[in-house]
Amino acid sequence: MGKKSVPRRLADNEAKAFAKSIRVSPQKLNLIAQTLRGKTCQAALNELNFSRRRVAGEVKKVLQSAIANAENNHQLDVDRLEIAEATTGRQFVIKRWRARARGRVGRIMKPFSNLTIVVREREERA
């Protein structure tokens, strides 16, 4: 018997990679995602290589995973890939505290976020 196959949510010329629990706030992660949207994958990798942001290495791993998925799972041409979507989402927040003066507490929020990157093979221009 087995389960029925689920139809593919992406188009035939798209591939996706997803990362959970990246230790950075979604707002900061979205700053990097904004710079990547619409670029070719090679240009995005170059930009992430030289980015000074701490989380750029994690984003680079997810992008490389999306490129590998496109090449190995969907037989797409790596040289024609561009970033179709780069979305961030909120995961959870670990709450800590630090003692402050006069018996008070300073809250420390440690947010985590998700990152989804969808790459698309662009059509040949004649």
Image: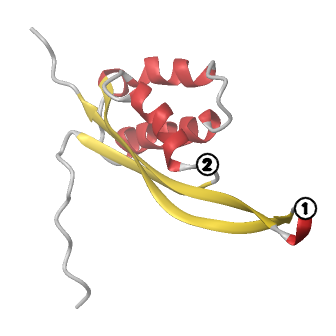
In the picture, the quarter occupied by the C terminus is top left
Residue, far left: 126
Residue at the bottom extreme of this rendering: 1
Asked whether residue 51 is in view, the answer is yes
Q: Quadrant of residue 8?
A: bottom left
Residue at which label 2 appears:
24
Residue located 46% across and 23% down the image: 44
- Whichever of callouts 1 and 2 sits on the residue coming sooner in the sequence is 2
* Disc number placed over residue 32 in the picture, else none: none
Between 13 and 62, the residue placed more toward the observer is 62
**Of the two numbered discs 1 and 2 in the rendering, the one whose residue sits closer to the viewer:** 1
Describe residue 67's horizontal placement relative to residue 21 as left or right.
left
Does residue 11 lie above or below 108 as drawn?
above
Which residue is farthest top?
Answer: 126
Q: Quadrant of residue 101?
A: bottom right
> Residue at the spot x=45%, y=40% of the render?
68
Residue 21 seen in render: no
**Front residue (pair 35, 67):** 35
Residue at coordinates 51% horizontally, 24% vertically from top-left? 45
Toward which corner of the image does residue 109 lie, by quadrant?
bottom right
The amino acid type found where label 2 is placed reads Val
Badge 1 marks a residue whose secondary structure is: helix
Q: Is residue 34 above or below residue 4?
A: above
| Left or right of residue 8: residue 77 | right
Residue type indicated by callout 1:
Ala
Residue at image mark 1 = 101
Q: Position of residue 96 (x, y in %)?
A: 75, 67
The x, y position of residue 114, in whole percent, is 48, 55
Compared to residue 93, the image places residue 49 above or below, namely above
Q: Nearer the viewer, residue 68 or 88?
A: 88
How many dots with numbers?
2
